């Protein structure tokens, strides 16, 4: 892992920067990893300082700058519980840099913060921006659909039970469709949530079990193409 080596790694990276001043992109990357090292070692103020050094000295390395600004937001969100500063950092990623995966991640993080703040209406709107603005980043879109579905599922315990469960299933379905095949962990989250939502919506396991059977079928039969002989196999998500 990149943080192995502790402070010796920081010294090594600083030496690299001093010896390679002509290669700005490589220096920016090394400076970024210095910030990551302090982050991993829980020196959050110093980590922010190092990430800000990337922003100050290597503005032409825009992708590394975007990552640095995003990591600053992550520190504010997950380590300092400063939601306002986190939103500002993520908003800067979206405002200041070209379309990239980091922007999609920043947008999803903004939606997540509004969820933490229990501003669910705003959270739904921010999640929608992920797949509306960044549909090419399939994994981030899938995660946004999944998290948005989880929010609808949570709301179903408070009001409009059936409506919110159906909205949850609609979002899970899209998460299922967007999720890249190689992202098995995310796919498992989505499948488990689909089964759970069917169980809560129907009050029984009929459609949940139908979806489980469908999953088994498409794993065995490449692409999930159902022939006439497979009458007992169907996808209950087709109704959503």
Image (cartoon, rainbow, N blue to C red):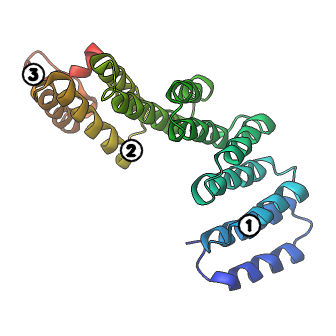
Figure check: 119 above or below 27? above
**Which residue bears the numbered disc 1?**
45
Q: Residue at x 75, y 62 (%)?
A: 48
Q: Residue at x 63, y 25 (%)?
A: 133
Q: Quadrant of the N terminus?
A: bottom right
Of 98 and 171, nearer the camera is: 171
Q: Quadrant of the C terminus?
A: top left
Please report contact status of discs 3 and 2: CB closer than 8 Å, yes or no. no
Classed neighbour count for the residue bearing mark 1: other residues with Cα under 10 Å, few (<14), some (14–19), many (≥20) = some
Figure check: 15 above or below 100? below
Q: CA distance from mark 3 to mark 2?
A: 28 Å
Of 222 and 33, nearer the camera is: 33
Q: Residue at x 33, y 43 (%)?
A: 189
Of 100 and 20, nearer the camera is: 100
Q: Earlier in the sequence, mark 1 or mark 2?
A: 1
Coordinates of residue 146 in the picture (x, y in percent): 41, 34
Coordinates of residue 176 in the picture (x, y in percent): 36, 32
Q: Residue furthest bottom?
A: 8
**Which residue bears the numbered disc 3?**
230
Please tell me in which quadrant of the rendered image residue 100 appears: top right
Apparent side of residue 226 relative to residue 36 in the rendered image (left or right)? left
Classed neighbour count for the residue bearing mark 3: other residues with Cα under 10 Å, few (<14), some (14–19), many (≥20) = few
Please report contact status of discs 1 and 2: CB closer than 8 Å, yes or no. no
Q: Earlier in the sequence, mark 1 or mark 3?
A: 1
Apparent side of residue 160 relative to residue 6 in the rendered image (left or right)? left
Q: Earlier in the sequence, mark 3 or mark 2?
A: 2
Apparent side of residue 177 relative to residue 114 in the rendered image (left or right)? left
**Which residue bears the numbered disc 2?**
186
- In what element is the residue under mark 2? helix
């Amino acid at each position: 892992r990149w943080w192995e080596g502790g402070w010796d790694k920081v010294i090594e990276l600083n030496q690299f920067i001093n010896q390679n001043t002509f290669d700005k992109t490589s220096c920016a990357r090394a400076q970024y990893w210095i910030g990551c090292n302090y982050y991993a070692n829980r020196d959050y103020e110093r980590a922010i300082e190092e990430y800000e050094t990337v922003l100050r000295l290597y503005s032409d390395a825009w992708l590394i700058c975007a990552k640095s600004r995003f990591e600053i937001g992550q520190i504010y969100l997950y380590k300092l519980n400063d939601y306002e500063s986190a939103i500002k950092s993520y908003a800067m990623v979206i405002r200041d840099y070209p379309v990239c995966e980091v922007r999609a991640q920043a947008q999803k993080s903004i939606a997540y913060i509004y969820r933490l703040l229990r501003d669910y209406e705003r959270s739904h709107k921010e999640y929608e921006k992920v797949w509306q603005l960044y549909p090419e980043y399939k994994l981030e879109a899938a995660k946004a659909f999944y998290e948005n579905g989880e929010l609808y599922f949570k709301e179903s315990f408070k009001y409009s039970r059936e409506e919110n469960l159906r909205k949850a299933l609609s979002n899970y379905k899209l998460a299922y469709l967007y999720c890249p095949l190689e992202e098995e962990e995310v796919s498992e989250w989505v499948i488990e949530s689909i089964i759970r939502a069917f169980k809560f919506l129907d009050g029984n396991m009929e459609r949940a079990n139908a979806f489980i059977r469908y999953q088994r079928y498409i794993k065995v039969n490449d692409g999930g193409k159902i022939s006439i002989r497979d009458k007992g196999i169907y996808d209950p998500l087709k109704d959503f």
